[in-house]
Image (spheres, helix red, strand yellow):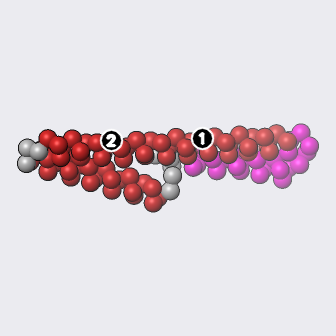
Amino acid sequence: MGIADKVKHTAEDLKGKAKETVGKVTNNDDLRAEGQADQDEAQAKHAADKAKDSAENLGQKAKGKVEEVAGAVTGDDRQEAKGKGEQVAADVKQKFNK
């Protein structure tokens, strides 16, 4: 998930919170419900993006492990190091996938 997606989802969530608040203040149940629905949709999109990123990171980590093992088996230190680097990069990306 890119920064643009995070900003977009946060903006949608804030818009929903504003609608919900205005609905509560004005006793407009439809507007309040619409605001809550907007928030739920934004949170669902955010969760879907996080899941997609997690899957991509897991794939990158697996690819790195395969490369590391292949390098170890063939005695190619460069390939082995590259594989380890891929795994570290995937771990770092996953930590920032919040």
- The residue that mark 1 highlights is 55
Residue closest to the far front: 30
Residue closest to the far left: 26
Q: Which residue does the image show at 39% across and 58% down from the upper left?
A: 7
Q: Residues within 10 Å of mark 1 (few under 14, many from 20)?
A: few
- The residue that mark 2 highlights is 40
Is 76 part of what is drawn in magenta? yes
Q: Earlier in the sequence, mark 2 or mark 1?
A: 2
Is 61 part of what is drawn in magenta? no
**How far from the left and from the top, in percent, is residue 90?**
63, 47
Q: Are marks 2 and 1 in contact (CB under 8 Å)?
A: no
Q: Amino acid at mark 2?
A: Asp
Q: Amino acid at mark 1?
A: Ala
The CA span between labels 2 and 1 is: 23 Å
**How far from the left and from the top, in percent, is residue 53?**
55, 46
Q: Is residue 32 left or right of residue 3?
A: left
Q: Tag 2, which secondary structure?
A: helix
Region of the chain picked out in magenta, as a range:
71-93
Q: Tag 1, which secondary structure?
A: helix
Q: Which residue does the image show at 80% across and 45% down from the upper left?
A: 67
Q: Which residue does the image show at 46% across and 46% down from the upper left?
A: 98
**How far from the left and from the top, in percent, is residue 36?**
25, 42
Q: Viewer-nearest of labels 2 and 1?
A: 2
- Say which of 32 and 59 sits in front: 32
**How far from the left and from the top, in percent, is residue 28?**
11, 45
Q: Tell me which secondary structure the magenta stretch mostly adopts.
A: helix
Q: Which mark is residue 33?
A: none
